[in-house]
Amino acid sequence: MHGSTKISPKSWLAFDLNVLRRLNFNSAILPFASEPALGVYLKRRDVKVAANDPLQSAWTRAFAQIANTGERLSSDDVNIVLDDAYVPGYRLQNQALSDWFTEIDSWWFDNVRRNIDRLKTPMSQAIASSIALSTGDYVFSFKEETRELRQPLSNVFRRLWSIQPEPFDNGQTNTCQNKTADDFISETPADLMFLRLPAAHAQGTKAYLGRAAWREEWLRGGNDFWTDLEANQRGRLGSATETKSQYLHLLEETLRRASHIKNWAIAHVEDGFIQTQDIVDTVSLIRRVDTVFTKDFSELTGTKAVIITA
């Protein structure tokens, strides 16, 4: 049986950085960059970062922060994004939004998505999309009994825009891709691979993502892409697996593709299904394991953070 009933974060940034400070590297690849924070911090260490994620929502956030060398949304850009955001039309352009939001919220996200396409550069579109995704997270942070405390979404968008961190230029060409992790690893050279292992699961991608699946459907303009996304991921690390041995076999295949990368740091959240020793044994099939770093959060979450270097 997969996973645990405990709720655990996918990573602990301070733990990740503490381990990476011990390693010597000038360039790094992140095959699964579900959150951009680690890549942003590595940029500030003057590391050349190449990030990737199979999900467009994760790629968009990474592109807006990791690949960004200085572009910000202007107040005019924000006005374009929020133009007539609450005005309903004849029908929703993205009907899937009604599966996630109330009617008025659906119109806001539908209109904002269309307005974002009017911005002049891919980077400005990514920044605006990233802020809109955070606005959606704001919506889902409320329960029915606290809904009356919510602010209008256009106000939330402007507030989130106003507190956006200043983009940082480290003088490197930092890139972001939206590919399968295996393809990305095979094509991208670096001194270090920081591989954050996706959790083992037996569900389809949409079911596994749960409520977060709205992000993909909003960005992609509907919900008819899931079958193709599943087919593209099938048989690769991150796809649905039924057994531990199947998951470890996919991990081994991924690691073999990364043989051209000198240093590995493999981050794993041990929750009872895939054990740290399982990962160590799999890594050892390809190269010698250097160190296993652990941070025990079992009292809080029932999990343990692990980073294996090799």
Image: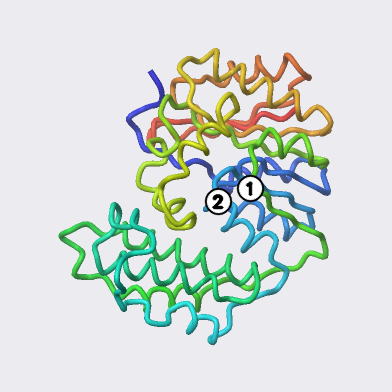
What residue is at 75 percent from the left and 68 percent from the top?
169
Image quadrant containing the N terminus: top left
Q: Position of residue 254 (x, y in %)?
A: 68, 26
**Image vertical order of residue 242 relative to residue 270, above or below:** above
Q: Which residue is mark 1?
A: 178
**Image vertical order of residue 5 relative to residue 280, above or below:** below
Classify mark 1: residues with Cα within 10 Å, few (<14), some (14-19) or many (20+). Answer: many
Residues 310 and 88: in front is: 88
**Image vertical order of residue 187 relative to residue 91, above or below:** above
Classify mark 2: residues with Cα within 10 Å, few (<14), some (14-19) or many (20+). Answer: some
Q: Which residue is mark 2?
A: 56
Q: Position of residue 258 (x, y in %)?
A: 76, 30
- Left or right, residue 100 beside residue 17: left
What residue is at 63 percent from the left and 23 percent from the top?
251
- Element marked by disc 2: helix
What residue is at 62 percent from the left and 16 percent from the top?
249
